[in-house]
């Protein structure tokens, strides 16, 4: 009789495994939002690795982590928005302006999501059980 596995115990174990997998997927998703979208080692816009010479964003006073090329383009975009000189490159057209506008809106959406009550609750939920064990 010692070798007989209780059906209730088996169902409970299966349920716990499923709950763990769901929680694990949530954790991976949350980690990607936190780590991948805010990676200090890559450009927020194009995703290329940022070299050590590109790391001084504070000196450039940019709100995003950008490589040298993307920072130049961002500066030109903001200059045009503020009524500065027209585009320095023929491909910096209306569609190029729309790409930057949309990308900046996306970055703002990510920031709001990361600061939302629900996302912060998810992080607390994911921290909870691990600390207890």
Image (cartoon, helix red, strand yellow):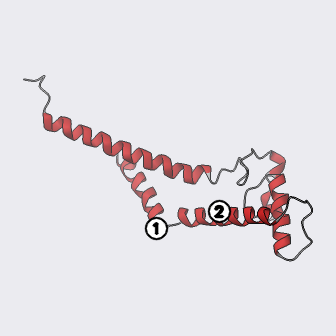
Q: In this picture, is 80 found above or below 35?
A: below
- Residue 28 position, x and y percent, is 49, 46
- Please name the residue shown 21% across and 41% down the image: 12
- Residue 10 position, x and y percent, is 19, 35
Q: In which quarter of the image is residue 97?
A: bottom right
Secondary structure found at label 2: helix
Query: 32 or 104: which is nearer to us?
Result: 104
Asked whether residue 59 is in view, the answer is no
- Please name the residue shown 81% across and 46% down the image: 52
Left or right? Give the position of 80 relative to 108. right
Left or right? Give the position of 122 relative to 90. left
Q: In this picture, is 32 found above or below 89?
A: above
- Residue 126 position, x and y percent, is 41, 52
Numbered mark located on residue 117 in the image? 1
Q: In this picture, is 16 found above or below 66?
A: above
Q: In this picture, is 5 found above or below 38?
A: above
Residue wearing tag 2:
107
Disc 1 residue crowd, few under 14, some 14–19, many 20+, Cα 10 Å:
few
């Amino acid at each position: 009789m010692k070798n007989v596995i209780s059906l209730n115990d088996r169902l409970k174990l299966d349920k716990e495994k499923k709950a763990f997998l769901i929680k694990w997927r949530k954790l991976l998703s949350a980690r990607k939002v936190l780590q991948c979208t805010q990676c200090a080692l890559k450009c927020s816009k194009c995703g290329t690795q940022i070299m050590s010479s590109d790391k001084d964003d504070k000196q450039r006073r940019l709100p995003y982590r950008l490589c040298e090329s993307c920072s130049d383009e961002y500066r030109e975009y903001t200059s045009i928005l503020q009524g500065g000189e027209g585009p320095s490159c023929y491909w910096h057209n209306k569609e190029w302006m729309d790409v930057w506008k949309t990308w900046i809106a996306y970055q703002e959406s990510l920031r709001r999501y990361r600061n939302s009550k629900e996302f912060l609750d998810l992080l607390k939920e994911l921290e909870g059980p691990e600390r207890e064990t």
